[in-house]
Amino acid sequence: MPLGQAASFDDELVKNAANIAAVESREKGINWTFAPMLDISRDARWGRIAESLGEDPYLAGRLGAAMVRGFQGNKLSDPTSIAACLKHFVGYGAAEGGRDYNSTNIPIHLLRNAYLEPFRKSVEAGAATVMTSFNDNDGIPASGNSFLLKQVLRKEWKFDGFVVSDWASMSEMIPHGFAADRKEVASLSANAGLDMEMVSQTYIQNLAQLVKDGKVSLQTIDELVKNILRIKFRMGLFENPFAPTGQPTKVYSAAHLAAARDAAIKSAVLLKNNNQLLPLDAGKKIAVIGPMADAPHDQMGTWVFDGQKEHTVTPLKALQTEYKNINYVYEPALAFSRDKNKGNFDKAIAAAKQADVVVVFLGEEAILSGEAHSLSNINLIGVQSDLLAALKAANKPVVLVIMAGRPLTIERDLPYADAVLYNFHPGTMGGPAILDLLYGKATPGGKLPVTFVREVGQIPMYYNHNNTGRPGPKNPMKLDDIPLEAKQSSLGNSSFYLDSGRDPLFPFGYGLSYTSFEYNDLKLSAAKIAPREKLKLSVTLKNTGKYEGTEVVQLYVQDVAGSIARPVKELKGYQKISLKPGESKLVTFELSSADLAFYGLDLVKKYESGMFNIWVGGNSDSGLKSSFSLTE
């Protein structure tokens, strides 16, 4: 799933996965896909976070562009290419309260600097189509927003593909209160520059009369039609409209399954590994417990209408086939993630006592994430947390493996697990991929593409926030430490929660490995650069552990003072570096004034001179720090 792919921080992996999807789709006669989804997603209650590329505009932009190149190949008419569709334009991920389809209220500077950026980069990558979003922003539904469709998309970005509405999003402008009837819907969308209507049929029912009435010009109709035909011609649909026949299928081919397994491995994130419990010793007996150990349908994740669960290799199935040498005992304890029946807990504890290590597979069913599957409580559902806590009675080391469609609030579960491996629903080959990781055939290298909050009340919480005038301290006063009858000012008068503090559970970009990495000797080519100069920086990365591993080296920048308040940090680069034990490598980055540009007070994108802080490290909350200045 896309959120898992984002955890790989791997442009080539994302491109290859999209290409495989294109090859298999064209084989079935499908030549257009509604992906990538580029909504900046900062609220895990929103079920569609599963489809997103995370919370960061830079990461989503790079991976979205990679996905476009994977889908579309060298040219749209290639027999292995399909047209990409950038969705949802724009702001859908900021739905109020994480409730799907809800309104958004994104100020213009934030819209320009964050929410539009992934779309701009993916348009530059050649995306053929764009889809308008369901939401209204500041009272204007996207399917009737001429500023977005004409000014930004066409005039500023020179987009020459076509725009399609989302499912009935045009006619939904009536309940939005933006249009009085279906005729007005068609007029508003056509004049705003929306080329193709999905489902609601207001165009086919009303456009002819609107032209006769002079409400929509014939020139407007011509433009909408030309935009659609232009892409169809580029795709070669008039010359070759049919699906190929007589060719062997590539669906479930060995190469595609190997790529799926590799993607699942590189998308997994190791969140905890006390006493180096992982990787496991293949000679020890394990207890396999939990509803997600053998859930072939749910392992595929959301938006799988035609997935064939008989092709899914679950962890249990992998133990029965490829990993047959592992001695294990299996007790699901719960039939599914929402199951509240504790009747089999004693069986699970008994199984755990028979083993040397307990591996507990928990998470979410596929139906609990995705479109229209918002949640106000994002703890492990049902009595899964109770099962995990109960297993401590066996007094054995516990590995928690989670498969879910969103970042769950798992702080309450961490004390009962010695190691935690997090997987955003890993798909068909998730089972063997997880076992490859558990037994050290592969080393975890994924990083979180979204912030993990401690509890749902912290949402929205994301790493690239503004500092505020009273930023919270690193170690704020804790709720239980407040003295009785404390004076109002004694608590610090700064921005944090008395009960959950200032910081998230795990920051953006976080992820452990079986090995350890050391960052040293951050060097900048200059303390000052002029606008036409590039700043070169380098850091030495060393593998100081016992395993070969891959580290995502992350570059963050802070514009200390601008014409508008700037985020405390922004991701500006990343590289995946693989090192053998004891090996070192010099990792280099370049920054130009264009990389530091933003939409300031005057809403013109440009750089502003001044001081900048810079960090290079393994996540958004760590790293070596330096600074430089950009001159006029």
Image: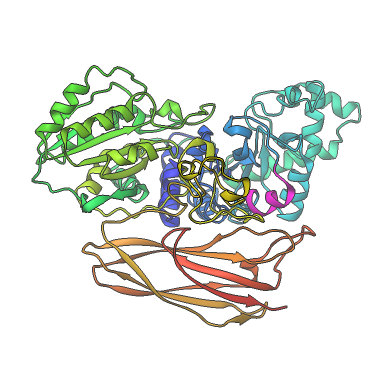
The answer to whether any part of residue 22 appears in the image is no
Relative image position of residue 27 (x, y in whole percent): 42, 38
Q: Quadrant of residue 532?
A: bottom right
User: Magenta residues, as a range?
Assistant: 106-115
Q: Residue furthest front?
A: 485
Left or right: where 324 falls relative to 270: left
Number of marks present in the image shown: 0
Q: Position of residue 625 (x, y in %)?
A: 49, 71
- Near-viewer residue (271 or 307): 271
Residue displayed at 34% across by 33% down = 299
**Which quarter of the rendering shows the C terminus?**
bottom right
Horizontal arrangement in the rendering, residue 531 relative to residue 222 (left or right): left
Q: Report the side of 605 relative to 418 (left or right).
A: right
What colour scheme does the image use?
rainbow
For the N terminus, give its image quadrant: top left
- Residue 329 on the magenta segment: no
Find residue 152 and report its horizontal and vertical position in percent: 74, 50
The residue sitting at the right extreme is: 214
Res. 164 visible in picture? yes
Which image quadrant is residue 317 in?
A: top left
Considering only vertical position in the picture, is 362 above or below 570?
A: above
Q: Position of residue 168 (x, y in %)?
A: 66, 26
Residue at point 58% right, 40% down? 237
Query: 278 or 303: nearer the eye?
Result: 278
Give the camera-side residue of 165 and 276: 276
User: Depth check: 172 or 198 in front?
Assistant: 172
| Residue 614 appears left or right of 249 | right
Q: Main secondary structure of the magenta part?
A: helix
